[in-house]
């Protein structure tokens, strides 16, 4: 059986990604060939630092023949990065390097060479330059996808924020029936089509205890009627629930997915429960895009103490599909 390759953009040059990538290679063997997009000079430098001895098969990004890709080695697409001028302070040169890595990856995906994509962590505030809320929106825009969602996936429980990297003061104004229905449909379709599961979905209220001292209560006026409308579509959904109790053991075990109104409302409890045992899946794209659920973590670069579990989970998830 032939497996499509897993395409990997290493991301931020000054990050822990290559460390956890090497750890993932040492402890696992994958059925899918791995194509890494990054600087060869940077890769070799980091391989020496972490004493990794692995064959590098340099390939041409324009003419990729999946039959000639080798498994359990590093199939590399080299993107030039001048290490002498490279600064740990995240310079304009490093941002251009990251963009070139993504541009090459997007061209490969659009040629249908693969439908499996992982990107390493990015310093979003610098790379996205406030044009996009996050990498989810950046990638969705490139593929002209207007409706996407961030699913932080764990086999026991996943979460999805309706809004992603918005300032908290802007969240309430973005919550509406149309947006909720779009996001819930993406979750339902992913679980049914990719995981073969009819998901049970809980929706959290926006306000503490789903109550408000204001005349307009979003939970009663927007969320409750929207949830009732979604139920009529045959989707197993309920709520709104207070967010301070939904993650208790006997409550969370009733659901596959908990949907929150804003980023930290659902990501904070999930990371507390499962730490690195989760992956970030972008729903709505014409391919599977996953990123490990952690940031560049510059302070830990080179210390050989970073946990590779999230990347292993990402690779294993795509290796099965």
Image: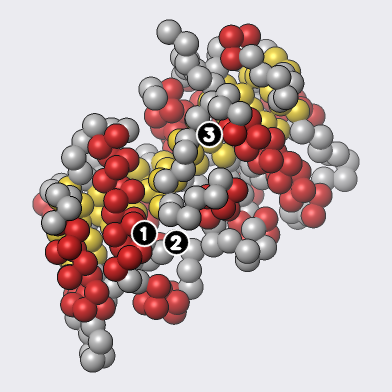
Q: Earlier in the sequence, mark 2 or mark 3?
A: 3
Quarter of the image containing the C terminus? top left
Q: Position of residue 175 (x, y in %)?
A: 35, 71
Q: Position of residue 158 (x, y in %)?
A: 30, 47
Does residue 220 appear in the picture of this structure?
yes
- From the viewer's perspective, is residue 300 above or below residue 132? above
Is 18 left or right of 201, judged from the image as shown? Answer: right
- From the viewer's perspective, is residue 220 above or below residue 312? below
Q: Earlier in the sequence, mark 3 or mark 1?
A: 3
Could you tell me which residue is drawn at 62 percent across and 38 percent down?
Answer: 106
Task: Tell me the crowding category of disc 1: few under 14, some 14 to 19, or many 20 or more residues within 10 angstroms, Cα based.
Answer: many
Q: Position of residue 66 (x, y in %)?
A: 59, 14
Residue 161's tag is 1
- Along the line of sight, which residue is nearer the eye, 218 or 121? 218
Is 167 left or right of 219, judged from the image as shown? Answer: right
Quarter of the image containing the N terminus? top left
- From the viewer's perspective, is residue 68 above or below residue 190? above
Is 283 left or right of 128, judged from the image as shown? Answer: left
Q: Position of residue 159 (x, y in %)?
A: 31, 52
Element type at mark 3: strand
Element type at mark 2: loop
Element type at mark 1: strand
Is 216 left or right of 122, judged from the image as shown? Answer: left
- Residue at the disc numbered 2: 164
Could you tell me which residue is drawn at 25 percent across and 87 percent down?
Answer: 216
- Residue at the disc numbered 3: 117
Residues at marks 3 and 1 touching, judged by CB atoms closer than 8 Å = no
* C-alpha distance separating marks 2 and 3: 21 Å
* C-alpha distance separating marks 3 and 1: 22 Å
Residues at marks 1 and 2 touching, judged by CB atoms closer than 8 Å = yes
């Amino acid at each position: 059986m032939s497996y499509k390759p897993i395409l990997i953009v290493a991301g931020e040059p000054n990050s822990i990604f290559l460390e956890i990538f090497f750890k993932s290679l040492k402890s696992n063997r994958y059925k899918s060939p791995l194509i890494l997009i990054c600087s060869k000079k940077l890769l070799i430098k980091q391989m020496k630092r972490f004493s990794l001895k692995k064959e590098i098969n340099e390939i041409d990004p324009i003419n990729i023949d999946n039959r000639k890709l080798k498994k359990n080695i590093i199939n590399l697409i080299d993107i030039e990065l001048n290490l002498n001028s490279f600064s740990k302070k995240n310079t304009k040169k490093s941002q251009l390097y990251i963009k070139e890595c993504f541009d090459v990856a997007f061209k490969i995906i659009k040629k249908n060479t693969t439908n499996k994509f992982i990107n390493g962590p990015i310093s979003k505030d610098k790379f996205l330059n406030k044009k996009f809320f996050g990498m989810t929106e950046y990638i969705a825009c490139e593929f002209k996808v207007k409706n996407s969602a961030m699913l932080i996936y764990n086999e026991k429980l996943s979460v999805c924020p309706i809004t992603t990297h918005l300032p908290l003061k802007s969240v309430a104004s973005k919550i509406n029936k149309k947006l909720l229905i779009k996001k819930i449909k993406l979750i339902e379709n992913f679980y049914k089509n990719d995981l073969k599961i009819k998901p049970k979905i809980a929706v959290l209220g926006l306000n503490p205890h789903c109550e408000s001292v204001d005349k307009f209560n979003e939970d009663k006026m927007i969320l409750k009627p929207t949830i009732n409308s979604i139920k009529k579509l045959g989707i197993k959904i309920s709520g709104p629930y207070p967010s301070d109790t939904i993650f208790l053991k006997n409550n969370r075990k009733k659901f596959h997915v908990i949907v929150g109104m804003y980023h930290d409302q659902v990501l904070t409890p999930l990371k507390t429960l499962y730490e690195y045992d989760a992956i970030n899946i972008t729903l709505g794209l014409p391919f599977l895009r996953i990123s490990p659920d952690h940031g560049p973590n510059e302070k830990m670069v080179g210390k050989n103490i970073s946990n590779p579990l999230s990347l292993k989970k990402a690779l294993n998830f795509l290796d099965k599909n």
